[in-house]
Amino acid sequence: MRIWAVANQKGGVGKTTSVVTLGGLLAERGKRVLVADLDPHGSLTSWFGYDPDTIAHSVFDLFQHEGKVPDGLPAQLITDTGCPGMSLLPASTALATLERRMVGVEGMGLIISRALAQLWDDFDYVLLDNTPSLGVLMVNALAATQHLVIPVQTEFLAIKGLERMLHTLQMVMRSQKNQLAYTIVPTLFDRRTQASVKSLNMLRKTYPDTLWRFAIPVDTKFRDASQSGQVPSALDAETHGVRAYRRLLDDLLEQTGGAGER
Ligand code: ADP
Ligand code: MG
């Protein structure tokens, strides 16, 4: 099982879209995929038509046992996602209360990683969607993941947010004493605008080793898809946005040693 997290401390940069699309593309290739919603807003959960305000079981359940992980994680999993091969570990809005309650609880940063260990034989890929704020949930994601994908919108303000994210990452890696490989992915790229082109060039100059070689373009299909709850790859394989994500997936597989499984 391979675990990838998609994170950035800025909202609206394409994290959830990346999780859904990469997940859909992996499932399309016959992989058993779990997408997990670690964002109290529950956008990923809503994408699949479930309501994070009323959902009975969610990621939240995993944090109810004083830092220990309950058995029987499959009870929280939703297999009826409308996308064959893709399951969902949903969020509930109650997750927003975690921060306050988990302070100082031993093992609280390893809940997700321990919970996923129970599913080692059930999935080929797990994609973790994250909230934009650094807290218990993101710390859990960074501890659990083997590779981090950092989407960054091609505009100047977003690049500032990226610096903050990389700083956070350094901090967390130091405290967890591990090194985490990551890929910065330029998103919402519009080659007709100066702002997009300039900020992509700046990203290339500043992060030559960790920046993905292409960019995810603006593609209205993604906005439409998030509103109708359809996984974009299933929606239309030929949009330029989906093609870009396919290329990203190939590169990520190459980079993380999964290319041979294609
Ligand atoms: P985040 O999870 O980082 O907050 P989302 O994935 O929810 O970001 O994306 C924010 C908004 O931008 C959503 O409305 C989404 O549909 C839209 N969006 C994301 N990626 C693209 C894209 N490549 N082209 C057009 N719209 C996009
Ligand atoms: Mg999101």
Image (cartoon, rainbow, N blue to C red):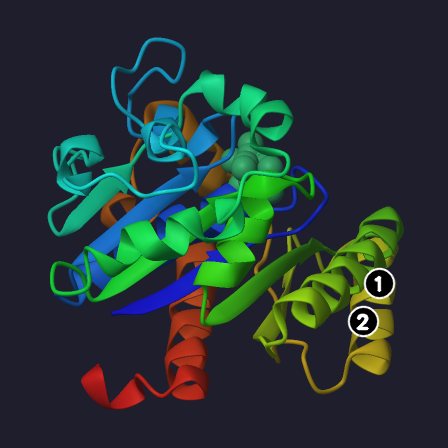
Asked which quadrant contains residue 160, the reply is bottom right
Where is mark 2, residue-wise? 203
Q: Position of residue 244 (x, y in %)?
A: 47, 66
User: How many numbered badges does the structure rendering display?
Assistant: 2
Q: Are marks 1 and 2 in contact (CB under 8 Å)?
A: yes
- Judging from the image, what secondary structure is the residue with disc 1 in? helix
The vertical placement of 218 against 48, above or below, is below
Ligand 1 in which quarter:
top right
Q: With 21 as the anchor, is 57 left or right in this view?
A: left
Residue 203 drawn at (x, y percent): 80, 71
- What residue is drawn where x is 52% and y is 45%? 106
In this rendering, position of residue 184 left or right of residue 96? right
27 or 219: nearer the eye?
27
Q: Is residue 188 left or right of residue 147?
A: right
**Mark 1 Cβ inside 8 Å of ligand 1:** no
Tag 1 residue = 199
Asked which secondary structure carries label 2, the reply is helix
- Judging depth in this view, the residue of 54 and 81 nearest the camera is 54
- Which labelled disc corresponds to residue 231? none
Say few, some or many: other residues with alpha carbon within 10 Å of mark 1 (under 14 / 14 to 19 / 20 or more).
many
Q: CA distance from mark 1 to mark 2?
A: 6 Å
Q: Position of residue 138 (x, y in %)?
A: 58, 47
